[in-house]
Amino acid sequence: MNPTITSGDPAIDIHDLTKRFGQTEVLHEIGLAVPKGAIYALVGPNGAGKTTMIKLLMNILQPTAGEARVLGVECEGLAGKAFERIAYVSENQELPDTMTVTQMLEYLRGFYPRWDVGLEQALVRQFDLPMDRKMKHLSRGMKMKAAFAGSLCYRPELIVLDEPFTGLDPLVRDELIESLLERSPEATIFLSSHDLAEIESFASHVGYLEEGRMLFSEEMAVLSERFREVTVTLETPMKLPHNLPGAWLQAETADCVVRFVDSEFRGEASEREVAERFAGVRDVTCEAMPLRAIFLAIAKTGRTQSQAAQIAARDRRVGA
Amino acid sequence: MTQILNIFRKDTRRFWPEIVLSVIVVFAFVLIYPNQWRVFHDRNVQQHMTFILFALGLLMVTGWGLLISRAVHAESLVGDRQFWITRPYEWKKLLAAKVLFLAAWIGVPYLLSQLLLLAEAGFHPLAYMPGLLFNLLLLSVGYLLPMVALAAVTSNFARLTMTVLGVLIVFTGYSYLLNGIPHGYTSANPYTNAVLAPLLFVGCAVAIGMQYATRRVWVSRALLIALPILMAVSVAAYRRQSLVDRAYPAPSAAAAAPLNIVSMPNAANPVEARSWEGEDYIDLPVQYSGVAEGTAVFVDNFKFSITTADGSQWSSPWQAIQERNLPGVHHAGLHMMIGPELYERFMTAPVTLRITFAVSRYQSDTVTKMAFPAGDVAIPEIGFCTTDLSNTLLCRDAQQPRLTHYTVLWSHGSCSDAQTSPASTAASDAWIEPASRTNSVMGPVWVWRSFFYRDFEGSDYAHWHVCPGSPLTMTQYHLLERTQTSMTLTNFLLPANVVPTS
């Protein structure tokens, strides 16, 4: 079972969610809980299953096994009025291209009893939207801004974004993030991204998905506390021992220096463990890591393990 | 309701060019359609009008298909990228909005066009509202509903068009199955498969409902693929033999034969055999008589069995025929189809030939006698009739024509001479049956022509006319019964020579 966030009443609650397309398993027994008010960033490399997971949450696809609830509603029953409380924006969503921005907003207004005209006007001004231009004639950035405007005006309780910032210039991206942060006190935000730098600045929670498996899911602050880049300076050169803890990732040695990423850093206790594992420790430094470095460490370890598993499987086949 | 109107307004605003085009085509159809019952002195003009009407009909249907595609594909039910699927659309309201759109921009113009056409044809439109609504129902079940179902499982107009072409190909094959059923020449087609229309309606309605409710495309597609298969199975189940047997029950032993049928070969009309398109035919001269006064008996189908002296027997399937008999004696030929191998087997020795006829007996009721019209006249029970240059009576009604027998008198010479001596006149007749309808559900007016054939001597044909003022009699009939009758020929010898015909 994967780690879960359990604090509070979750806006999104997922248990053992599995999705297969034919023989291909895209998501494997995902477990996840997103507390209300959180800004949850789902990260992972391309093809990890992020979009599939979001589509399952939005009832665009149906799961093979497991269950998921969004704002207390079973995802497979998510339809109609339930979407008055949910906003969904995706980078590859087909928008009503033949409508002007004005027409689109007018049309959408009819679907939402809680549509805030004042907020609509504010967003139109903030995004500087060309109201009389057809959606199909908008630039990618403007299209995304219009999609945001059409999704935020009814003050949704949950905002789900699938790779919303992909391909946008930094200025547009910052404008969109700003608009999101303005909503964040009243809404839970769940977004997928493979741009670690952009989500590091505002996400409160983060989950890492790779090859359909949730490697971890936790608060950003806890994650930052848990990972340290450890550099151990020894008195004499030595080979890496075989029985290093599993939490020590990417261990490598060069001359008298051993480096690794501790994914379960516990302060002094971790430093004592280092001293016990290596003879003649002259110095130990534990440095906090940026999110990007943490993910790279996890991703590389994951791939190495995956490759090792493939080699072992191949060897077994050859042996057989 | 707000959501329904919101979607309807959006679709109308977005697709107004298509709507305008479709409505223009419908009303162009209304302008051209009355030419069906107008008399043209130039036959080329009439042919052009018929072609234009056909083209407009095709355009109208295509336009409706385009409107259906636009409306349904505006909120496409196929794919996972449409923006509307994560908006608070309620599927029932979405479906209702689409139905409203189609009703407003296809149903209403269609109904209006029907009302206008009825008025133009001289009928009071509102008096025929039930019939018009029935036509609308036919259009909905036969075309609109299947098109909506196909649009619901395709993502755009191009894919819909390809699918429709595929469906047409399937139905062309399917029509081969239907062609195996002889329709005969009866006042009402007794072979109607009562399962097909409900099956089509239910299948399409369920597929549409499921697709809108769940968007499980492959489930809906599977249902639509299963539909023609089920329809084909239903056709196969309603095989022609059982259909004819059911429609024409065998008479009770005490029942009198509706007509006498005897074989009457003679030197002038011997029994002959010929081969054509891989089949052999026994041409048997027969005489029909004994039809009671005030009735008419139609022979719609026949089948025959051959029994040899050693007791072996072969029975043919039902074969279509067209013989209309009034009181009196009527001679005709019976063309009995049989496989060449069977023919060779049976031609060696005398056999017993038993022929069973499927017949319909009609009783005359209304007889209308009047002068052959010079212009457009209203005839009670018939409708409006006029005549054209080809000596035909052109009639129209807002209802399906009843089985009617028309008799007229041809005159020799020009009509202005008004020749009435028996030597210069000749009687001719024509039958009009309910199946004679020449229009489709697109038009509310039934139009039919009564061609009065007469075998005049070659070049003299041009001098014979059905003149205005000459006596015209119209006798209408209603069905009394459908039954079977038979005749048996013992020691029947099949002709030794089978003559090939091309």
Image (spheres, rainbow, N blue to C red):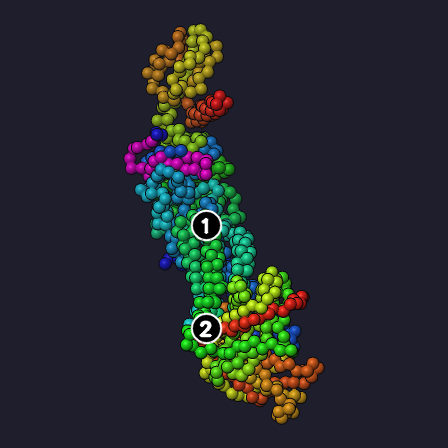
- Magenta stretch, main secondary structure, is strand
The image quarter containing residue A49 is top left
Q: How many marks?
A: 2
Residue A197, percent from left and from top: 45, 30
Please give the name of the residue rendered at 60% of the width and 70% of the height, measured from the top-left corner: B493
Front residue of B361/B226: it is B361
Query: Which mark, by number, is residue B9?
Result: none
- Across and down, in percent, residue B218 comes to 45, 48
* In the image, farthest residue toward the left: A8
x, y percent for residue A23: 45, 36
Residue type at the position of mark 2: Thr
Residues B345 and A214: in front is B345
Q: Is residue A52 left or right of residue B48?
A: left
Nearest to viewer (mark 1 / mark 2): 2
Which type of secondary structure does the marked residue at label 2 adopt?
Answer: strand
- At 32% from the left edge and 43% from the top edge, which residue is drawn? A73
Place residue B306 in its image quadrant.
bottom right
Residue, disc 2: B483
Name which of mark 1 and mark 2 comes first in the sequence.
Answer: 1
Q: Is residue A59 above or below residue B189?
A: above
Which of the numbered marks, if any, corresponds to residue B222?
Answer: 1
- What stretch of residues is rendered in magenta? A4-27
Disc 1: host chain: B
In which quadrant of the rendered image does the N terminus of chain B lie?
bottom left
Label 2, residues with CA under 10 Å away: few <14, some 14-19, many ≥20: many
In the displayed structure, B497 sits above or below B418; it is: above
Q: Spatial distance from mark 1 to mark 2, Cα to Cα?
A: 43 Å
Q: Chain of mark 2?
A: B
Secondary element at image label 1: helix
Q: Residue at x 53, y 63 (%)?
A: B310
The lab-note entry on whether marks 1 and 2 share a chain reads: yes
